[in-house]
């Protein structure tokens, strides 16, 4: 399957590439939440989390740690958000698995937290029972 990211990997669409190896690559996001926002992308176009092999996921999270260190060292950010939109209804625009690493600064006023709900009495325990793994 071809996606915008496979085209970027092949060099058919320009990008600012930060890393490339046998499993994953990294580019700057073209519409960053903050400047330096990067994407870690699997070379194979796995559409979502469940289809991505564990070995690739492990590699991706290791790269996220390196990217986090780079952002802290070079952009002096105070924190990072690691975000995966997993499925269209979660906001995933590109059906090719990727992890956002977003540099954050104290007082940057970026609101990327979803609104929250509250449980009614006993509901939290019910959900807990169903979701044990
Ligand atoms: P998601 O909503 O998690 O699928 O995120 C897709 C991300 O890809 C968005 O943040 C876009 O800004 C980014 N994006 C789309 N096209 C490009 C491109 N050509 N180069 C870099 N980033 C892109």
Image (cartoon, grey):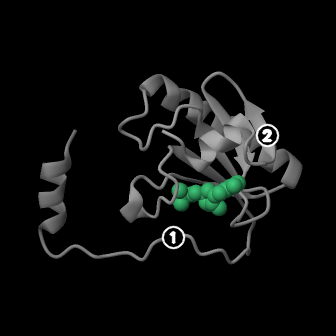
Element marked by disc 1: loop
Residue drawn at the location 50% of the way across and 45% of the way down: 96
Which residue occupies the extreme right position in the image? 74
Q: Which residue position is annotated with label 1?
A: 113
* Residue 90 versus residue 5 in the image, above or below: below
- Count all numbered tags in the image, as a single digit: 2
Say whether mark 1 is within 8 Å of ligand 1. no
Find residue 18 and name its label.
Answer: 2
* Residue 112 versus residue 45 in the image, above or below: below
Given residues 98 and 117, the one toward you in this image is 98
Residue drawn at the location 68% of the way across and 78% of the way down: 109
User: In the image, 119: left or right of 88?
Assistant: left
Question: In front of the other: label 1 or label 2?
Answer: 2
Residue 64 in picture, x, y percent from top left: 64, 39
Element marked by disc 2: strand
Residue 50 in picture, x, y percent from top left: 35, 38
Residue drawn at the location 59% of the way across and 75% of the way down: 111
Given residues 33 and 96, the one toward you in this image is 96
Residue 81 in picture, x, y percent from top left: 61, 56
Local crowd size for mark 1, using a 10 Å CA cut-off: few (<14), some (14–19), many (≥20): few
Residue 49 in picture, x, y percent from top left: 41, 41
- For ligand 1, give the image quadrant: bottom right
* Distance (Cα) linking label 1 and label 2: 27 Å
Say whether mark 2 is within 8 Å of ligand 1. no
Which comes before the other along the chain, label 1 or label 2? 2
């Amino acid at each position: 399957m071809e996606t915008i990211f496979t085209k970027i990997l092949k060099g058919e669409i320009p990008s600012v590439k930060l890393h490339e190896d046998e499993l994953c690559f990294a580019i700057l996001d073209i519409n960053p939440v903050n400047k330096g926002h990067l994407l870690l992308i699997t070379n194979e176009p796995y559409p979502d989390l469940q289809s991505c092999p564990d070995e690739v996921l492990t590699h991706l999270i290791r790269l996220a740690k390196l990217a986090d260190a780079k952002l802290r060292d070079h952009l002096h950010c105070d924190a990072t958000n690691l975000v995966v939109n997993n499925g269209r209804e979660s906001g995933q625009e590109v059906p090719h698995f990727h992890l956002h690493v977003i540099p954050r600064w104290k007082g940057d006023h970026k609101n990327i937290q979803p609104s929250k709900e509250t449980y009614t009495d006993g509901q939290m325990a019910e959900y807990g029972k169903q979701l044990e793994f």
